[in-house]
Amino acid sequence: EKQEFEKSFNEMISALPKRKSWGILEDYFQYQGFWLHPTFLKGVVSAQQKLQAQSTDIMLCNLPKTGTTWLKSLIFAIVTRASFDHSTSPLLSKLPHELVPFMELYHADFPTYRELGVPVLATHVPYPSLPKSILDSGCKIVYICRNPKDSFVSLYHFNTAILTSQNLQPLDLDEAFDMFCEGVSIYGPYWDHVLGYWKASLAHPDRILFLHYEEMKDDTVLYAKKLAEFIGYPFSSEEHRQEVPEKIVKMCSFENLSNLEVNRSEKRGVIQNKMYFRKGKVGDWKNYFTSEMAERLDGITQQKLSGSGLSI
Ligand code: A3P
């Protein structure tokens, strides 16, 4: 069965449009309108065929570098708070990515994610390619978006950090920027990804919670409460009195997580844990963009999002 899957997968991707990627991993292939690396695409196709989501599952969906690590830690802490507190949480000794698995790398051969005791699964898959079982199950979907300028800067640094650590030559900032603007970036076009989930969240507000990185930075406690309520783990009034939401937010803060030993010094494969924690700030693009770059990206964003009611 596995061999058959490999064979039909290889046949399928050999017919897809292909582009040079930003350097890490293989080329991008355009699948259902988005640019994916074959390694992840294989996981998407496998999940489309085999994933059996349940109504109690929670899916975290977003583009890379828009807040995955943060949301994984918040959702994990909220869901497991009856078993652990801020001094015993596995988040203190494990990278959030070890606690909440990535759908694309699991080829849908779970239920490993539920075996971890936490029915949470993360994916970068665009809305139109979400496995049907996720939509049919009625499970909760949390989407986080981040402004495109900071998303690009974060993505560029992450790529550069990985390539440099492998003694490979990173792409020029300008070259990466041109590709990003053209829509050729991991799981891009950026705007189409965001719009897919945005429109779906308007159509199904009970099923899809649409969050903004910037708003969450601004009032994390408020959004942690909304998040808990939405995924079906609301804080009780007693928990409010005991400031449980505040404690969870503090534990999952950039300052706390980035200073933990596990996140400072360990690595998984070619990725050092600390690469997931760079600055964690809003507006870092100002340190890298010329005014022409900002104008160009803002122009594309305005045009792509016009009439959608979304501003990022
Ligand atoms: P910067 O590169 O701008 O610092 P992802 O988790 O999706 O890979 O995104 C990584 C981005 O989120 C990085 O942004 C990283 O610093 C930031 N980040 C990681 N942990 C965070 C946290 N606990 N709170 C806020 N931002 C965080």
Image (cartoon, rainbow, N blue to C red):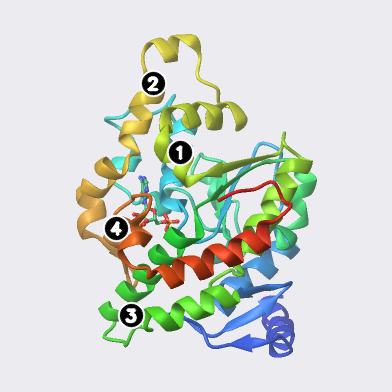
Q: Position of residue 162 (x, y in %)?
A: 33, 74
Q: Is mark 1 within 8 Å of ligand 1?
A: yes
Q: For residue 278, which numbered disc appears in the image? A: 4
* Kind of residue indicated by mark 3: Leu
Contact? badges 4 and 2 (CB < 8 Å): no
Q: Which mark is residue 216?
A: 1
Residue 49 lies in what quarter of the image? bottom right
Residue topped by disc 3: 163
Marks 1 and 2: CB-CB under 8 Å? no
Give above or below for 2 relative to 18: above
Residue positioned 31% across, 32% down in the render: 250
Please report contact status of discs 3 and 4: CB closer than 8 Å, yes or no: no
Q: Residues within 10 Å of mark 3 (few under 14, many from 20)?
A: many
Q: Nearer the viewer, mark 1 or mark 2?
A: 1
Question: Nearer the N terminus, badge 4 or badge 2?
Answer: 2
Mark 2 highlights which residue? 244
Query: As shown in the figure, which amino acid type bears the numbered disc 4?
Result: Arg
Label 4: how many Cα within 10 Å (few below 14, some 14–19, many 20+): few
**Which tag, 3 or 4, sits closer to the chain's start?**
3
Distance from the alpha carbon under mark 2 to that under mark 3: 40 Å
Foreground residue, 96 or 237? 237
